[in-house]
Amino acid sequence: MAEHTAVEEPAATRSAHEGILRRQSARESAARTYARALPIVPVRARGLTIEGADGRRYLDCLSGAGTLALGHNHPVVLEAIRKVLDSGAPLHVLDLATPVKDAFITELFRTLPPGLADHARVQFCGPAGTDAVEAAFKLVRAATGRNGMLAFAGAYHGMTSGALEASGDAFDVRVARLPYPQDYRCPFGVGGPHGAELAARWTESVLDDPKSGVPLPAGMILEPVQGEGGVLPAPDAWMRRMRRITADRSIPLIADEVQTGVGRTGAFWAVEHSGITPDVMVLSKAIGGSLPLAVVVYRDDLDVWEPGAHAGTFRGNQLAMAAGTATMAYVRENGLTERAATLGARMLDQLRGLSREFSVIGDVRGRGLMIGIEMVEMVEGEGEGEGWGVAGTGGSTVLDETGRSGGSDEDRGAAGLLGSVGLSSADDAGPVVMPGSTASPRPASPELAVAVQRECLRRGLIVELGGRHASVVRLLPPLTITDEQATAVLDRLADAVAAVARGHGRGAG
């Protein structure tokens, strides 16, 4: 595997670069985040590539936290922005009707899931996704006359007060939390379809038990793929179950598509994988074509607001609407959703091969071009080569024909316990992991994740971190990434993982 090393830059260039970073550190808020882990100063960018003030070039797999569906400065986006600027059109119009807004709404409605576009309303909010989440909460509370909300463990919906209450880092909780299904760290220690079934049953119990302490809520909000929660795709069957549960109880279902929308997961909207139609969709990031824009789309029968019930000075961003229209149309017309699905599956397959080579990778997961690699510690006393064939499993784990863990001999004897809760292990497509199993996942390692991110940056690759313990290395490349660029990304990532593994005494298996 070729080693990618840092390039020495001229002293004057390095001095200017370091001066900008030094002044940022002295003058900007301590709340800054990306700037701490990524000490670069972008000055030019195109597509996947960023050039820093130090003269170095980087492959950007952060993409503005998923905002840049077409990468940096795509020609169709720049053309759309220039067209508005050159036309003399007003740039600030509050919520007045304009040809630019009309074109944006028309393109947006063209892409919406079946069953929603024909009966939809759209509310333009402040320019951030969290503003749209707040608007969605206000909407369903007004429409139902109820107040409580249902959300899921590990969720991230924004940084304003109401959005934070529904997110995983909430301190003052006024939102009922429900289990979100996942295989690797299943809250029930089961994983696969069985874990998803138990999560669904828990949700039904909370809603139907008069003594659960959770009154009938105003709405349920969920992410079809938890991004900041660790790149956790919701099982399609579980998504359909949530749709039935909420519909049967007249609970509006809110799909947070801020990060998953506009083709990111291999469908234009991630809810399309499961075939459901939510009552409300929260949209931001990529719909603005790299510029600030956020909207709520919802069923027209929920439109009970009085004039001014939700507003915002900057809800009429004409440049963002033009850029967003161009972005959505380009993704739709050029098959970029299918491209994301195909290339994403290929990248996931290669990364799973890497996980079999290095024990510091506990799990690889994702959907489309939304990919996560969870870094883990080695179990104390485990020697090199033991259990490295399966991410996160122990010595007596058995593999099935797909390479998944089928559990140890003792695990497979747990079918009786599964049956006691009305489940069968016969059709399980995921790992069956019971308490005390040798197949329990290794502890998450945020330190190794930070080390991989740092080594990636040394090699000219920008990646994000996320997950419950900030132990998940995340890839969010633009949908326009080429096969050659994808290979370069994976090569640099593999080199970074190898360097970290060597540095921590964990060689290849």
Image: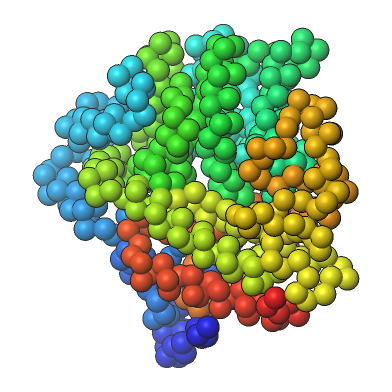
Q: What residue appears at the point 80 percent right and 45 percent down from the top-left corner? A: 412
Q: Is residue 164 above or below residue 466?
A: above
Question: x, y (%) of residue 97?
Answer: 22, 26
At horizontal 69% and vertical 19% (from top left) the residue drawn is 204
In this rendering, would 413 be left or right of 52? right
Which quarter of the figure has residue 218?
Answer: top right
| Residue 495 in view of the camera | yes
Q: Position of residue 208 (x, y in %)?
A: 71, 13
Q: Is residue 176 visible?
A: no
Q: Quadrant of the C terminus?
A: bottom right
Could you tell whether 384 is left or right of 114 in the image?
A: right
Q: Position of residue 149 (x, y in %)?
A: 62, 22
Q: Is residue 60 left or right of residue 373?
A: left
Residue, x 70% and y 24% (percent of image)? 201
**Of residues 346 and 277, which is closer to you in this image?**
346
Q: Is residue 80 above or below residue 111?
A: below
